Image (cartoon, helix red, strand yellow):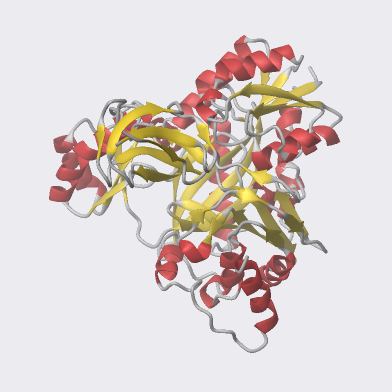
Amino acid sequence: MAIGKIFVANRGEIAVRIVRAAQELGIATVQAVSAADETMLAARLADETAKVGPAHASKSYLNADALIAAALETGCDAVHPGYGFLSENAAFAAKVEAAGLIFIGPKPETIAKMGDKAEARREAQLAGVPTVPGSDGIVKDAAAAQAAAGAVGYPVMIKAAAGGGGRGIRIADDADQLASLVPQASAEAKAAFGDGGLYLERFVRRARHVEVQILGDGERAIHLYERECSLQRRRQKVWEEAPAACLTPGQREELCASAVKLAERVAYRGAGTLEYLFDEASGEFFFIEMNTRIQVEHPVTEMVTGVDLVAWMIRIAGGEKLSLSQADVALRGHAVEARINAEDPAADFRPHPGTASALEVPGGMGVRFDTMLYAGYQVPPFYDSLLGKLIAHAETREAAIARLARALGELTVEGLPTTAALHLALTRNDDVRRSAFHTGWLEEWLKGRPLADDRVEPGQARMDQTEAGKEGR
Amino acid sequence: MTKTTIEAPIPGTFYRAPSPEEPVFKNVGDAIAVGDTVGLIEVMKSFTPVVAEAAGTLVAFHVENEDAVMAGQPLYDLEA
């Protein structure tokens, strides 16, 4: 049952990505738009648009009934949820199916199972995938947490079973601290997610974040190698790479094979990502959670494997079997992605909506810019600050970083500050160039206020002037 | 008695309470002191309090909870 018309139940750059993939497959698109998004790029590119509610996401992109009604009214036969919003909401996926539409993603049962982190962890253990030492499921109170933490080993992380995006996480160094943090964490989880369930995990200091991309057709699954996303600020990824430079070839094969085992165990359908912590000191990796959707950083994987992940999501949802075998997937070179956000890196990353009065997009070999920007676009203040992702691909990591620096130098967004200046500084940093970092590195580095520094090194004067010009607007 | 209309300082989403589970910061009829928080404006997932710069009695809101506001749009009326 091939798909004829897709309803894009998302916005921003990922909506653009989905519309483009559909167009290349000869599939019509209807773009959902809130009252604040009628002029967005995906709305311009799609065949049709459908109003789904007011600016506030809870009344539009999070309003399952409004989205499904709009999809049915416009004659769509499938819904792509993108990332964020309702993409990992099993009830939404089930409602889409109940309305007779195809949900472009895993089965609702898989989303529910893998979205519950305690259950996902149990599935991983049953598949023989290493997990971070942790509590056996939910800990019901402070005493139970202390008993579990004795076996896990301190320091421990207290996490919300229904949480996500790093919210609600606390770290306890000893039993006393744990006892005082558990009630707070439970109350906060209850308020934020409607579920106060908590579980514990060993906290690995100086961990690196690696994740494996999976594609499955409900029977067979393959991996598309891994990404590293250790450069994070406030637990949000800032810069991503493929492959992970910190792994040996042996570790890579072992890691990726473990992800396939878990994906096949849950009969995974569509694109998914298994996130792991990698302890560089011991060489151990531990499964943390699965994202049952396309991810922001998927392009780095596409660049090093040549596989169009979004197109495959659509083809699989339309009933095609995965024609790729594991042997068909080969790594070629290295790719780096810089998230370009509407934030001012010189002012503690304050978000800054506004009008992109002029735009110059980088080009040339190995450069890709997935963005929602166009010249004259008014970036609304109601949603995420992600404007786009600048991706550079080259034969080696060193060359990819040099290419990213060159491309960042060509990028001009007038009218609002962006995080391009942060990324340019990262491309010049020795630790970044040597891949000597961990998930806490970026925040530590930012404490030294490197972006407030106005030293101009010889040979870099031209680029710095360009940057100073951008910041002066 | 003079009535003053207070405008949104920045564009974003206006909230009358710190979270959906908590009571609103201020109701119509409440006394407002300088420095009181009257609402929040969310800009790209970051929250900025709307802090009163003048004292008086809150007599009307021009926007509802979770409404989209533009910079300069009337938020509430104060009588002093």
x, y percent for residue A59: 53, 23
Note whether A114 is above or below A276 in the view shown. above
Q: Can residue A193 be seen in this view?
A: yes
Quick one: quadrant of the C terminus of chain A? bottom right
Residue pictured at 68% horizontal, 17% vertical: A70
The one of A318 and B74 positioned closer to us in this rendering = B74
Task: Answer with the quarter of the image where residue A137 lies.
Answer: top left
**Which residue is most to the front?**
B1
The one of A294 and A138 positioned closer to us in this rendering = A294
**Which residue is most to the bottom?**
A458
Indicate left or right for A410 with A416 as reference.
right
Indicate left or right for A414 with A124 as reference.
right
x, y percent for residue B76: 40, 33
Note whether A417 is above or below B40 in the view shown. below
Residue pictured at 74% horizontal, 17% vertical: A77
Q: Is residue A88 visible?
A: no
The one of A390 and B19 positioned closer to us in this rendering = B19
Residue pictured at 62% horizontal, 20% vertical: A67
Indicate left or right for A118 with A154 as reference.
right
